[in-house]
Image (cartoon, rainbow, N blue to C red):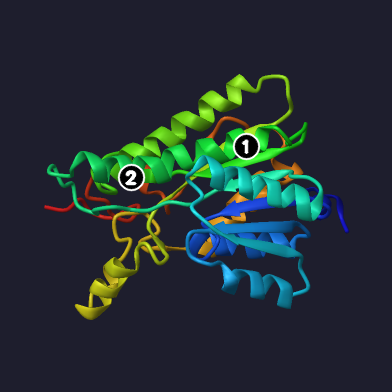
Amino acid sequence: MNARAERLSLSGRVAVVTGAAGGIGQATARLMAARGASLVLADLRAPDETLAAIRAAGGRAEALTLDCATEAGAEAIISAAITHFGRIDILHANAGISGPLNPDLTVGAADFAEILRINLIGPWLAIRAALAHLGAGGSIICTASVAGLRAGAGGIPYSASKAGVASLVQNVSCALAGQGIRVNAVAPGLIETGMTAPLYADARARGREDRIGQLNPLRRGGEAEEIAELVAFLASDAASYINGQVIAADGGLSASLPVATRPAGGNPRA
């Protein structure tokens, strides 16, 4: 193994991934396992498919079906890592829901609170439970969203919750000063997952699949595996000096103010 591959390796480490039944969580868990990590998978929907895929590839994993955004659930997930593998080195707090995709100004308090509970309080509870066992070299990665960085990429409760995740990792990273534990977040753009499946299905049904992701400079949507690569990097020693950051993986969507773009050297549009 060359030096670069060794720094990217997760061999001998134990990772917890919430929201592991599909989408980004599933892709991340499978990639971490392929790079040598032992996994504890958790989701409200049984992560059996993820578990089977990891074990079929020769990896080590255990799975829990529970609500990740409760104190009891968070404690159970971390306890499972200690019970089965003796430690925890990596936490990917990924579980989340979208809520209404449109900027609905009539969302009630209960619905708003539920989105905040799952998307923001859930990661906090997982972090708090993990900190009792994480040591120097530990890595926490939360799933935020470009919707938490700018308006226009998601519903109001979802966007507010993901903005909270961005603030959470910044504040926790600073609160852990001197302990050698890194805390970061990934901010995906439009990624094809179960959460975005209705949007993709509608575009395809109307023959407008080529317009998916048209607002970003890459002019396409992303894949869960592309986000998994970033998460696995942040979990590894290759990212040893990256801390307190929210890193967008959005095809360039958040790089620009809203403008009518054109290819370099092209003529301005009338």
Quarter-of-image position of residue 181: top right
- Name the residue that disc number 2 marks: 114
Up-down relation of residue 171 to residue 169 (above or below)? above
Front residue of this view, candidates 78 and 17: 78
Asked which secondary structure carries label 2, the reply is: helix
Please state which amino acid type lies under the numbered disc 1: Ala
The location of residue 212, given as percent across then percent down, is 31, 66
In the image, residue 76 lies at what x, y percent? 62, 48
Report whether 110 appears left or right of 45: left
Determine the secondary structure under disc 1.
helix
Q: Residue at x 65, y 75 (%)?
A: 52
Residue at x 34%, y 63% (from the top left corner): 196
Q: Earlier in the sequence, mark 2 or mark 1?
A: 2
Q: Is residue 258 visible?
A: no
**Residue that badge 1 annotates:** 129
Please, is residue 106 above or below residue 183 in the view?
A: below
Q: Tell me whether circle 2 and circle 1 mark residues in contact (CB < 8 Å).
A: no
108 relative to 2 in the view: left or right? left
Q: Residues within 10 Å of mark 1 (few under 14, many from 20)?
A: many
Name the residue located 36 percent from the left edge and 48 percent from the top edge: 253
